[in-house]
Image (cartoon, rainbow, N blue to C red):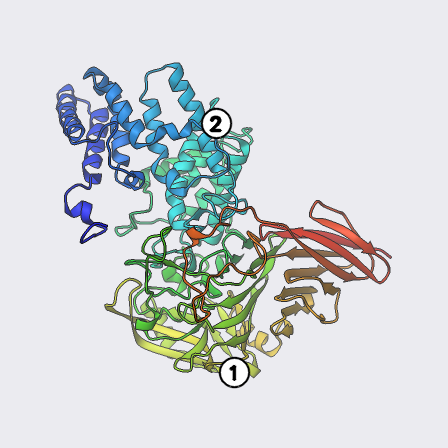
Amino acid sequence: MIPNWDKDMFTKLGVEMKEYFDLMRRIATAYYNAPKPADKEELKQMFMAMYDHITDQGVTYGSCWGNIHHYGYSMRGLYVAYFLMKDVLREAGRLEEAERTLRWYAITNEVYPKPTVNGIDMDSFNTQTQGRIASILMMEDTPEKLQYLRSFSRWIDYGCRPADGLAGAFKKDGAAFHHRNNYPAYAVGGLEGATNMIYLLSGTQFKVSQLAHETVKNVLLTMRFYCNLQQWPLSMSGRHPNGKGKLIPMQFAVLAKAGSPDGKQPIDAELAAAYLRLIAFDQAPEQDAPDYMPKASVKEEMDMKKLFEKHGLQAEDNPQGNLALGYGCVSVQRRENWAAVVRGHSRYLWAAEHYLPANFYGRYLAHGSMQILTGQPDEMVTFKTSGWQESGFDWNRIPGATFIHLPFEQLRARVLNVDKFSGMEEMLYSDEAFAGGLSQAKTNGNFGMKLHEHDKYNGTHRARKSYHFFDDTIICLGSDIENKNAEYPTETAVFQLAATSPSKLKYWEAFQDNGQTYLDPNGVGYFIPKHEMKNVRFEKNFPQVTIGERSTKPTQGNWVTLTFQHGKAPQGASYEYAVLPRIDEVELKQFAKKPSYKVLQQDKYAHIVSFPAARLTSYVLFETPQALPVGLLQKVDTSCLVMIQEQKDKVLLTVSQPDLALYRGPSDEAFDENGKRIERSIYSRPWINNKSGEIPVTVTLKGKWQVAETPYCKVLSSDKKKTALRFTCRDAASFDVELRKVK
């Protein structure tokens, strides 16, 4: 509608006000800390001159800029500056005017109506909380101010509670939502607002509820589980897959200072311990940190460290175990200092976000990828220590993903404005509901997905993919890989690793390919079974020349790659390999001679893996199974994920239905005249705020078992031959039950 529109036009025309308000904030801060009266007077005059000018230019109550929502990013300095200069404004007779200005731009009156649902948009936490509380605290002490504070507290409280469907901002499983997906890059801004407000209101009559407090705490602890040490994986980077995104340790400290959610402890020991681990390594301040990341000074971090240590608190050990994040289509396995992060996509959760100009080439980030974030045992884990850098990275070969290896000009996203609900962006979905993970007792787990690429690019591309996690072993399976692209090869990337230091380059230069076992400099081992060796290709590319994630300019680096070559237009292709993230050369050779696992089934119906020594069996059941391998599990009445850990006289059974069930039945796709799925934005879908529906799953086990019934697990029948259990699944959650043998 505006001729020659440019997203930076406000800045170019001189009407972007961020720097103006940031200067006002610096002047206000200096005034507040100035020791000399003459300095304070000069700073006061400077501030009032800027205040008078910007007010004259229209930054005042009733300004008709239209939708001012995204001005929150530019105006944060305004709120702090006016609040700090409250006494100066009162002295000048301008306080009421300034109060009204803040309430107008912060849209503070929005807190008055009682919320009808849980959750608020992540941007509201990021850009509005500070302005709203500042506009309220600016007021003189009156009954109206008290009413505003109570309403604000209620607004924050409901905003922090777990939201339904794909609504923002926080989920019961620890996901943090923006743009209708788990999105850490936006979450760090939102968590800055949420944690600060919970802390500010703690210990007062305005404190948030225990549920709200616990929800935000869980989001932080979940984030520190899928990040390693501070960085989140490439596949969870949204439109910023550049390896720069990090969690913010100070948010853990601030929420720890707010006390425990139940109000019984003045400091939350669990959050404080997490904070102390996250800052345990000396780090120089980053010069090129993304502008969306909140900042904290080294002094602030050290002050928090001293406070917690004064209370006798110590850093936690590295998190261990397994996480299945249903609202992120993510599974994470952690042992020692490594983390293996798997991500997929579905008909509910998009595969990648592309903007102009951002993430042009990351189409395959959630095609069943797995990134190993690791390093030497005593070093701080980063992308660099894990063998990743942007320079020279081949955006086709996302580790773990199954993909068609395209020229970059064909891989580049064709970003469009597809409907009135969205902007210039691309967020493509599958039409498959089966994608996600199971976590057994938060220790081990599995992940499965039906991969189906969108018709905008290669809609014939399909695969069945699974991962099976047991302690320090990960079994990776693929089957039914197919597409009709006869021009370019289809591959599955086992690894793509950069030689990020001279020593690592020297290591890979000397590396000898034996076709079956591969060991990287961090001790991550890869095993290829003999029947698969003919299908893999190991490459040393010194250098490898590619392009950046948002640029066509060439970049280069030294890389090694291992891929399965499925050929052009494959039909029924498959793969099998194992990853052992902490192993030495001798142990890897022993594993190759006698693998610790057996693949019991690998087809379109199911991927089933057993670990005989541990008596553990992992089931990824893509379809309702017609028959199952001989074992304890005899029958299941629908697709699902199952894990069974057998012990002497008892069994731990875990069941999950990864379908979020935000709607049921066929996928809600729209088709063109050729029967191809039409690109549509997620914001146009009517079901995006629906609650996760219940899906019953009936599991039949061999023999008679005693089960302690729960709200989600009921015994349907039990005799000497078999026991039938009915699980009520929702939220893509995992449900554990312990069974005891009836003799």
- Relative to 425, is 450 above or below? below
- SS of the residue under disc 2: loop
Tag 1: Cα neighbours inside 10 Å, few (<14), some, or many (≥20)? some
**Nearest-to-viewer mark from 1 and 2:** 2
**What amino acid type should be assigned to the residue bearing mark 1?**
Met
Q: Residue at x 51, y 67 (%)?
A: 451
On screen, residue 595 versus residue 459, left or right, reads right
Query: Residue 316, how many percent across, how many down?
Result: 50, 45
Mark 1 vs 2, N-terminal side: 2
Q: Residue at x 26, y 36 (%)?
A: 75
Tag 2: Cα neighbours inside 10 Å, few (<14), some, or many (≥20)? many
Q: Say whether residue 229 is visible.
A: no
Q: Residue at x 34, y 38 (%)?
A: 127
- Residue at which label 2 appears: 207
- Relative to 34, is 429 above or below? below
- Residue at which label 1 appears: 533
634 or 519: which is nearer to us?
634
- Residue at the farthest bottom position: 534
- Relative to 661, is 121 above or below? above
Query: Residue 129, how many percent across, how many down?
Result: 37, 33
- Relative to 425, is 223 above or below? above
509 or 637: which is nearer to us?
637
- In the rendering, which numbered label is found on residue 676? none
Q: Say whether residue 404 is visible.
A: yes
Query: Residue 738, how many percent across, how many down?
Result: 73, 52
739 or 181: which is nearer to us?
181
Query: Residue 455, how many percent across, how many down?
Result: 43, 68
**What amino acid type should be assigned to the residue bearing mark 2?**
Lys
Q: How many marks?
A: 2
